[in-house]
Amino acid sequence: MCGIVAYVGPREATEVLLEGLRRLEYRGYDSAGVAVMNGSGISVRKAVGRLSALEHELAGNALHGGLGIGHTRWATHGAPSVANSHPHISYDGKVGVIHNGIVENYRELKNELLAQGVTFKSDTDTEVVAHLVAREFRGDLKAALAGVLKRLRGAYALALCHVDQPDRVVATRMGSPLVVGLGDGENFIASDVPALLKYTRRVIFLDEGQIAEITRDGVHLYDRELREVKGKEVRTSLTLEAAEKEGYEHFMLKEIHEQPHAIAETIRGRVTDERVDLSELGLDPAVLKGVRRIAVVACGTSLYSGMVGKYLIEHFTKLPTETWSASEFRYADPVIDPSLLVIAVSQSGETADTLEALRICKQRGARTLAVCNVMGSSIPRTVDATLYTRAGPEIGVASTKAYTTQLAAFALLAVGLGRMLGTADAADEARIVRGLEALPAQVKALLTDDIVAVKRCAKRYKDVFNFMYIGRHYNYPTAMEGALKLKEISYIHAEGYAGGEMKHGPLALVEDTFPTIAIAPRGRTREKMVSNVQEVKARKGVVVIVSTHGDEEARELADYLIEIPDCEEELSPILAIVPLQLLAYYTATQLGRDVDKPRNLAKSVTVE
Ligand code: F6R
């Protein structure tokens, strides 16, 4: 949802900005642009499409200077075009601005400016900010920004420069992420830490509403009333290597292969002697005993992990648990009171709908927890406690290792909460812990053994127009997630369905060209899944079965068989999704799709 980066220092700003934008391109790739201050004014270069188009533009028309702002765009207001690309410049040519988010009341502000004779060059909501700041400027950029912020509604991370204060960048955030990078004789602003890693690991995560003013020599933070405040400097544990492809053709493939390590990291230190230890969360057992209901809120892939989480939590805590798409929750008037525990699930920690659902819950006194991957992001900063997934940076737009680590985190959380509430059985706990500990090696084996079968399957079915994925109970969400992976990167239509629901409608779709992927590992619903497969076969449908090693019946029934290692039923979604991630990946690459940056999507959805 747009990436922003800013630099002040002795280097060529353009180089720093391009490096930062390269790391932020996962946030949007409709267009990109940079503005550099060069002594006489602000010079801008923009290009539609990927960052490489901007690099090409700059190669023929370079920009020099030590202060600059850069942007990679995911279009919200106004089509991808040069005019709508950021940075935007004010009517007097003095203010440059980049923005991630949406100014919700921009129409009203634009009409006001139009009535005052200001001419607009773009269709964006952002351009109003440049003009308003120019109007408000009386020699101090941060004061002008603070004045304008009083009038803005919506979500934003903004960075600005002004020709009359050519030594500084001023930035602020509300609902969109922003981090300050601290250098030696140079300082930085970015939407996300990887953009800074080449230069510094010392960062300050800006709080909501704070304003940062950076020059070569210093960083000052202010609240909305321009009272100076102190920021908390942290040393990020992320490394540049983790943000590179390391020889893989795509980030998605690299991230799929990182899953054994990511899962091992997620359980590290949280299981010992067949017990789950979640003391890091600092949960008060007395508070927990007051919880009567649990609601899991999330979007997309994180929502599907939350659906598995619901089954696990209900099993181990006996507390009624609902899952909610965060975008629905916000407007559905759900019952929220202090007896509700809300669990927000998010890879990025910045998803606008999830964040807003959380805020509503907090306002009404609910207890809040998060399962999140990005430290210091907005969701962990909003909740009472966070169980981090430790997957490392996920760059590919299609979520893979974040999902499987979320599933592992939910297993820990369900058992851990169950123990604190006295509802989880010790033998059950030990069984899950052993199962979790076995997972990294099992996923590794799966990634080595089954790739050939999956590749063959992808080759065979890449040209069909529709896919059906079916599963039951713990693997019903696997069907949804498998279908989502396929559609988002290959653009083939795919639906995830509960196996038992096929005969209530979708069976009508089945014919000899229509593949159904049935997720049927060992467990309580396997038999029922086999019956569902029989029903599809009886209608001459094509079936790919994901089953446990050694399931001879599945072998006989399947047109293609994908086997996963035997594991605890509750953990089977973690193994079952891996070949489906690969199936989506190989289908998409055979179709020549841009796997890491699928059309119309962006990694971090910071708009509603
Ligand atoms: C799909 C995908 C998205 C995200 C969703 C929520 O592969 O990545 O569906 O899961 O946008 O994002 P987070 O988890 O960052 O809140």
Image (tube, rainbow, N blue to C red):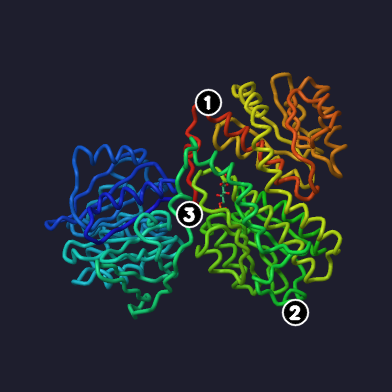
Whether residue 561 sits left or right of residue 201 in the image: it is right
Q: CA distance from mark 1 to mark 2?
A: 55 Å
- Residue sitting at x 83%, y 27%: 535
Look at discs 3 and 1 and give the one toward the viewer.
Answer: 1
Secondary structure beneath label 3 = loop
Q: Please name the amino acid that badge 2 sits on.
A: Ala
Q: Residue furthest left?
A: 40
Residue 426 position, x and y percent, is 85, 64
Observer-nearest residue: 452 or 366?
452
Badge 2: residue crowd in 10 Å (few <14, some 14–19, many ≥20): few
Q: Earlier in the sequence, mark 2 or mark 3?
A: 2
Q: Please name the amino acid that badge 3 sits on.
A: Val
Number of disc labels:
3
Specify whether residue 111 is in view: no
Mark 1 sits near ligand 1, with its Cβ under 8 Å away: no
Badge 3: residue crowd in 10 Å (few <14, some 14–19, many ≥20): some
Up the image or down, 572 lies above or below 166; here it is above
Q: CA distance from mark 2 to mark 3?
A: 37 Å
Residue 425 position, x and y percent, is 86, 63
Mark 3 lies on residue: 607
Mark 1 lies on residue: 591
Residue 564 position, x and y percent, is 74, 37
Secondary structure beneath label 2 = helix
